[in-house]
Image (cartoon, coloured by chain):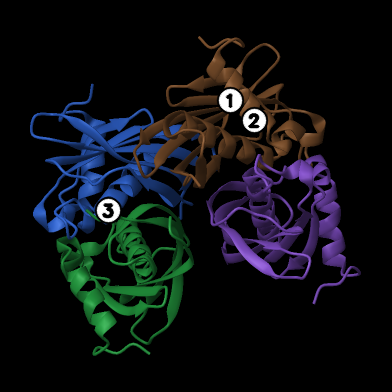
Chain colours: A purple, B brown, C green, D blue
Amino acid sequence: MTTPADPALTFAQKALDSQPFSRLLGARVTAFGDGRATLELDIREDLHQQNGYLHGGVVSYAADNALTFAAGTALGPAVLTAGFSIQYIRPATGRTLVARAEVVHAGRRQAVVRCDLLTVTEDGTETLSAVAQGTVLPARTP
Amino acid sequence: MTTPADPALTFAQKALDSQPFSRLLGARVTAFGDGRATLELDIREDLHQQNGYLHGGVVSYAADNALTFAAGTALGPAVLTAGFSIQYIRPATGRTLVARAEVVHAGRRQAVVRCDLLTVTEDGTETLSAVAQGTVLPARTP
Amino acid sequence: MTTPADPALTFAQKALDSQPFSRLLGARVTAFGDGRATLELDIREDLHQQNGYLHGGVVSYAADNALTFAAGTALGPAVLTAGFSIQYIRPATGRTLVARAEVVHAGRRQAVVRCDLLTVTEDGTETLSAVAQGTVLPARTP
Amino acid sequence: MTTPADPALTFAQKALDSQPFSRLLGARVTAFGDGRATLELDIREDLHQQNGYLHGGVVSYAADNALTFAAGTALGPAVLTAGFSIQYIRPATGRTLVARAEVVHAGRRQAVVRCDLLTVTEDGTETLSAVAQGTVLPARTP
């Protein structure tokens, strides 16, 4: 169980905070380790699309970043996301967006990662909003 | 050649401005019609990742939205993006991100759209940063 | 638990046998129902690529067909696969290829499905070879 | 212009013929070089699905293989397809399936490739049937 005092989680949150765009969106890491990473963000009004739902671009940001962080637990911090595919299931609404990513394979050449994108309401009800999968490459060290 | 006085472009920019998240990112529509849409945004510092490049999540936002707008020229304004795939080519840097989307097929059931994501420097040099393709569905009218 | 006498499985196998290409590849359905479908085929030599592994195109065939069959358990037999994404994990070798697909969401407009592609050796050891996810649409009735 | 006497094309056809599954499907290479590869196959009855159209799995095989061959023109013969995404546009029917792949970027770490899947009738009419894009990695030399 990860807690705020978990050094791996502290490290991951610091890495996330070093991304100005993640700070702009208010993203936080709530789990990090053993091939898994969870990112969350509040569904603020300035992240909406035209109908009052969370913009799909925020969901795809969360997928991209969660995939990359999960791969980082297996490949190390220097990684490069090669690409991903996302399928939207329903408009995202609620209090929080949660992106739960899990490595399904990590080798020397690539990691393959899946991610569930869920929304959570005030009372804790989770709803699946999108699914993603992608490939992350180890970045070459200088 | 589309110009600011083009009614279709004015309509599209208004649609984009109705998305709070697109306003937050400073996105603008620079072409809209005949199965094509181009979205652009300035590569501001608050949209960066940790190494001073544009965050991949901003690139995926632009892909998602450009695909949707291009499909809208063919399917009408009420559309629903089913999903997309994006492959990153190189870190995005420069002055402007440009997302050029083009419908490759539009039927009654779906539109299939491709998108090039380019960065443009001060002197106008374009560099391909990512490619995407996706499926957009017509939204049911109430 | 599905058995050879399961009417749903018999129906699904008959549907698969109505596809000449599935007969050519020797594909069989081993589970069908409740949002899930499993397809299997023997890794014959005439399905290999140049290095003695199962050809990636056979793996992608199995992904495509398993996604479609799983969606069929939720949407009915008349479905149309809009597309899918597949990430290969390792070369496929062994006795049998198994494609296990599961619907993660089925609505009126689309089903979103994930699929694991595994290889099984003579002694029953399973190895993950690829993962896929896709979108399936209900086909319009005439 | 590639011709049967083109050594690159002869090399590519030989590589394709070394794949038992490609021989089973009757695939041939009709263009190979400069970041591009074209594969073709006759739409035989044993490659059909249940409604008399070419099976989607054959289309995905052709996409996979054409992407790989196109990447091979840029990365060399030892390549490994990491994955791809395919969107189907319409049922494939006609005399011939043509898969035209083109590298959009090739670096040291990966190639990103797009592919058009077309069908051609007896009188030469081409119809777009699907589009694909994928990532190919250089294989490590032993």
- At horizontal 27% and vertical 71% (from top left) the residue drawn is C43
- From the image, tell me which residue sits under label 1: B12
Please say if B98 is above or below A55: above
Q: CA distance from mark 2 to mark 3?
A: 36 Å
- At horizontal 22% and vertical 77% (from top left) the residue drawn is C11
Q: Nearer the viewer, residue A54 or D137?
A: A54
Query: Mark 1 belongs to which amino acid?
Result: Ala
Q: Are marks 2 and 3 in contact (CB under 8 Å)?
A: no
Q: Nearer the viewer, residue D5 or C36?
A: C36
Occupied quadrant, residue A132: bottom right
Using the image, tell me which numbered label, if any, was put on residue B16.
2
As drawn, the residue found furthest toward the right would be: A5
For disc 3, the chain is D
- From the image, tell me which residue sits under label 3: D56
Q: CA distance from mark 2 to mark 1?
A: 6 Å
- At horizontal 47% and vertical 21% (from top left) the residue drawn is B33
